[in-house]
Amino acid sequence: MPAPPVPLTDLAVSQMATVAEIRLAPDHRARLLEMGLLVGTTVQLVRFAPLGDPLEIKVRGYHLTLRRHEAQQILVAPGGVPA
């Protein structure tokens, strides 16, 4: 049985995961979708800023910075394969 999805902020640095759900408001969700962050996409947590906000992820071959409150609304299934 697969593990339940967790917030993106729960990943360890360099851990990979697959996006399971995006719970952001429609206007913020649309911005992320335009940048390629879709359900089913593999992401990798690159690093947290020194104070924990923002955080950087690698998605579709580029680095994307998200605010912590946004990343907490993106649920991921740990694991995943590099794209």
Image: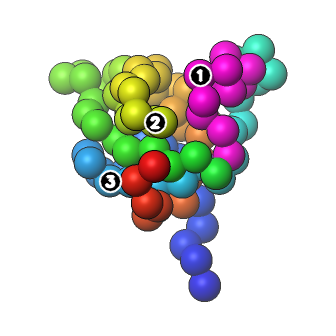
**Quarter of the picture holding the N terminus:** bottom right
Q: Residue furthest right?
A: 26
Q: Of the residues shown, which amino acid type is indicated by label 3?
A: Gln
Q: Residue at x 43, y 60 (%)?
A: 81
Q: Of the residues shown, which amino acid type is indicated by label 1?
A: Met
Q: Mark 3 and mark 1 in contact? Answer it, CB < 8 Å.
A: no
Q: Is residue 37 magenta?
A: yes
Q: Nearer the viewer, residue 45 or 52?
A: 45
Q: Which residue is mark 2?
A: 59
Q: Is residue 8 magenta?
A: no
Q: Mark 1 and mark 2 in contact? Answer it, CB < 8 Å.
A: yes
Mark 2 Cα shell of 10 Å, populated few (<14), some (14-19), many (≥20): some
* Residue 35 numbered mark, or none: 1
* Residue 62 location (% of width, % of height): 39, 27
Mark 3 Cα shell of 10 Å, populated few (<14), some (14-19), many (≥20): some
Task: Tell me where the magenta segment starts and ends, as one range.
Answer: 29-39
Q: Residue at x 46, y 36 (%)?
A: 59
Mark 1 → mark 2, Cα distance in angstroms? 9 Å
Depicted 51 relative to depicted 81: above or below: above
* Residue 80 location (% of width, % of height): 46, 61
Label 3: state its secondary structure.
Answer: loop
Q: Residue at x 52, y 26 (%)?
A: 69
* Residue 8 location (% of width, % of height): 48, 44
Q: Which residue is mark 3?
A: 15
Depicted 3 relative to depicted 47: above or below: below
Along the horizontal axis of the image, is 64 left or right of 3? left
Label 2: state its secondary structure.
Answer: strand
Q: Nearer the viewer, mark 2 or mark 3?
A: 2
Q: Of the residues shown, which amino acid type is indicated by label 2?
A: Val
Indicate the colouring scheme: rainbow
